[in-house]
Amino acid sequence: MIVGIYFNYIVKTIGTAFLGSFMTVFGISFYAGHLILHEGEKQSPAVWGYLGGMIGLWIIGSIVQWKLFKDLPDGFKEEEEAFEGSNTQLISA
């Protein structure tokens, strides 16, 4: 259980970075072409560029998320603390 709690933040960080890098590369390849191979088509050298770009973006995205959100692994605690003492009820006239 404790291992799952510890790795929860790491898995979220790496997973969202991977999805973001994949969607970025797939979006670029949608316009630039040469990523998806059709039957009988030779593999383009651009596929290796897409793969390298995706891995690079994945690493950069993981590092950025790790640096920015390391202090707040369980959500945005600062926002929760800001509303603790305040009156959040609606005032009716």
Image: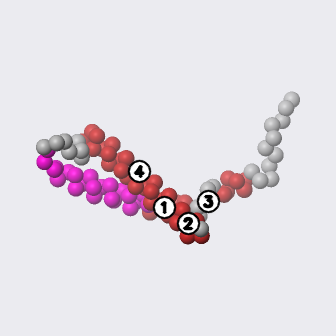
Task: Give the number of the mark in front: 3 or 1.
Answer: 1
Crowding at dot 2, Cα within 10 Å, few <14 / some 14-19 / many 20+, comes out as few
Crowding at dot 1, Cα within 10 Å, few <14 / some 14-19 / many 20+, comes out as few
Return the residue nearer the eye: 6 or 46. Answer: 6
Distance between mark 4 and mark 3 Cα atoms: 21 Å
> Which of the two discs, 2 and 1, labels the residue nearer the N terminus?
2
Distance between mark 2 and mark 4 Cα atoms: 23 Å
| Residue drawn at x 77%, y 53% as measured from the top left | 84
Amino acid at the residue labelled 3: Asp
Distance between mark 2 and mark 3 Cα atoms: 13 Å
Q: Which mark is residue 20?
A: 4
Amino acid at the residue labelled 2: Gly
Tell whether 33 sits left or right of 15: left
Quadrant into which the C terminus falls: top right
Identify the image quadrant of residue 34. top left
Name the residue beneath numbered marker 3.
74
Name the residue beneath numbered marker 1.
11
Question: What x and y, as percent, mark residue 11?
Answer: 48, 61
Quadrant into which the N terminus falls: bottom right
Name the residue beneath numbered marker 2.
4
Tell whether 61 sits left or right of 38: right
Q: Verify whether residue 51 appears in magenta.
A: yes
